Image (cartoon, rainbow, N blue to C red):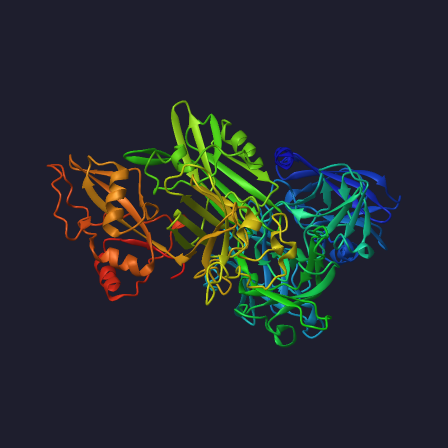
Amino acid sequence: LQLLALAAAVASAADSAQTIPLYGEKLKGFVTIENVADDQYVLSFKMDDMPSDTRLSLHQAAAPYDSGVMPENCRRARKSPHIFRNQPIEDTTVQGTQLSGHTLILGTTEAIYACTTVILGSQDLMVANFHADPVQGPIHIIPMKDKIRILPDLKYIPHYDGTIGVEFIDWAFVESCENGQNANQNAVGMELGIDSRATLTIQTGVHISLFNFQIFRNGKPFACSPIVIVERRSIKAGGLRLIQPHYYVAVKNVGDELDQLKIREDCLDVATETLHSHFHDFFPTVSIFGPDTIMFKSVVLNSTCASLRPTFPLPAAMVDFFHPTVGRLVLVDTDDRIILTGNLRSIADKDAARATVQISPKSAPSEGCPLYLDDCTDCFTVPDAAIIVGKDDESVSLIGVLPYFKLTEMRSVIVDLQWTEEPFRVCANLTSLPGGALQASLAARRYTPVSAKTMATVVVLEYPANGYSEVILNKRADISSVEAHARPVDMAVTSGPPCGDQNIGPKARSPSWLQIIDAGIKTGKNTSTYTVDEMLISGENSLLGTSLLLSHDSDFYCGSFRFAGDTNRLVARIDGDLHGFVMMSQYAQTGEIPTEVTYSITRPNSSETEFLQWEVVSVTNETCDDAPVFNPFELDVSGCSDDKPYLCAVGDLSSKDGDISTGTKQHLSVINLPISGTRSVGDKSLRISSTFTNDTIGCYRLVPMEEASFSWMVYSNQSLTSLQSLISKRLHLESFQVALEYNRELVGGRCSTYRVTVLETNERLSDILFIFDVENRKFREDEALVCGEKEDSTTSSPITTTPAATSTAAATTKSAAGAAANNTTAAAGVTTTSAAST
């Protein structure tokens, strides 16, 4: 909120005046640039320290603010043509078109004391970034009234230095990178030089749209990049907040006052600590933009050490490890480099160690890890990049810097302790996050028998690299109360309305993030955004499956947080001494998302609550009692506990997440419970035992199940519960396998059409769809209904598409009956959902 307030204040003053620091070994001060008339600006100087022989020049070049090579950048700028030079340090009036994008240099004819490139606050700064072998770097662009100024900073990739002579390249603004010849403004007679920062100014005569920047070598399209507006970058750690508006100005502290920055590569690497002194509110010797960014490095604040994490989105890819190293690594695209961050922990060793990390374009194999470290020419390797802390140590954020590559082309990560006598290597596949975030959303609906109107939405964006989540609220009605409920809305519960306690359960203990949603959703704003310093989607306290109940006066709206992706499901039917089900759901796109578990177990003829131990076991030749707990990593589980779940076997659910209970329906999230892949609990058994006697009650097979949806027309004088019972008996299903939408479509004066969703195995779904007449919304053997004179018989497709957030592509059935059913129902729009089959 402080940063948002600061941004508003800066924006309001941008058109009038801006103050820029000037910092060098012999000169320290500020220049204030004030707009006094149309395209007229006055430069005013206030110096803390300045030699008496200092003079002012303005040159037609740009000097990126790179603290490590700033003197060299200033010298290169002075070699370019000047607009004026050797002026005294006094108030000076300059035209904005002469000033914008050009560099002020303070010094003498022999020496340069300081310089700064001026980017006027009233103008957009845009950029196109290039990474095309052998050329890389940004090209900044400033649109003006009737002209465009280009600030190039292209250079050769380091290993090409000296191997290519002086080269100039042609360029053009293009509407699409797919057609490089379709230029709406070209560069006739104005080539760009490699390793040149001299600016180019082209007269447009009119305002033109800037979409993409195309460069050419030898007259042929060479590389193309989208043109985007440069966004201010900010990073934070504790109460420290640092911002840098763009590539050409110093870093400013807008958080807690601090005399010195103590920067380390990581918190354990004391030898790399460097000190950076402040100059008023600025830290001129560090950068957030550029290849020498301090982003993701660590800062020592008083007696603590923390990572400097960005507060803005960056493209990323993430991977989680579970054995023998546990933790998460995130790769971040910063435009100039790929930065590796995250934290790793050994589950066996007490001592910390460093490991080599390799990024591979190949997928990780199902068993073992490849020897890519020696033979992968397309891989990118960072020696000693990963700190693996001991099993009892505090977590430490690591950092590694890789040369730029296309993050979307990488598939897996390998972590290797190369110096160990026996191979220690873990690998896993990457999950791509083009926007830098995982996303979950909630749509709060007002349910009536004939509609389900959305009254509010909540979108949660979790940024794994940044260490926070963003909550975006949008409401379409007045809301005076917000409650969290532990269970998701489930249309298989027909004993009450969707927003009732029978469905979403009683009011839950309020999580910390609910206070933010509660405050935001009650404000007068229709849309608002808030930041929460938690991993709300993939963290231990994931909000997935949690419902919100919103209300105002007598109106109630509810919805559940769902991940935007396909879903795999495993179901265990509980029968015998107990009755009920346990359903495990995991989103198929990424294994980093916790598995949601929903269960409802009762003991017939008993109303007492009974606590049960639950485990996933591998039943092969053993009996259920003797079957071993599923432990694919062969862990030593002596240290397993609920506060150290990474030391537990995958199948030891009671030790990791607590016992389950009989009576009411429950919902929880479980980390490291894969239901697909080589270490899946699929086709294993769920063993349930009494916590009182330790006796095994039974083992129940975990079976993959999928969903199919269709519209069913019935007479209106029947309750949802009776309809659910009718279709359950007819199809030989349990009630939890049959969901009916609360709202229905009225047909004529006597009938209603309900959307029905059935949960079953793929083979059985084929049989069910085969006996249903989708076109006429009835079972084939049933007679047509007489719905009255107003019956609408023109509906050709009674099925609506399942929302993408909760369904997947149509399943391909395997049996001949299923094939016939699919052929029959495809045009009518039967929806079958199966992540496993896509």
Name the outermost residue toward the right: 52
Residue drawn at x 57%, y 65% is 412
Q: Position of residue 75 (x, y in %)?
A: 78, 57
Q: Where is residue 172 in the image (x, y as percent from the top left)?
A: 53, 60
Closer to us: 569 or 655: 655
Q: Where is residue 705 in the image (x, y as percent from the top left)?
A: 37, 56
Q: In which quarter of the image is residue 1?
A: top right
Name the outermost residue toward the bottom: 375
Residue 791 visible in the displayed image: yes
Q: In this view, does 10 lie to the left or right of 701?
A: right
Q: In this view, does 409 lie to the left or right of 588?
A: right
Q: How many marks?
A: 0
Q: In this view, does 565 lie to the left or right of 381?
A: left
Instruction: Please identify the quadrant where the C terminus is shown.
Output: bottom left
Q: Is residue 117 left or right of residue 490?
A: right
Q: Quadrant of residue 367?
A: bottom right
Q: Where is residue 805 in the image (x, y as percent from the top left)?
A: 41, 48
Residue 336 visible in the displayed image: no
Residue drawn at x 27%, y 65% is 815
Closer to us: 28 or 170: 28
Closer to us: 642 or 155: 642
Closer to us: 517 or 393: 393
Above or below 426: residue 392: above
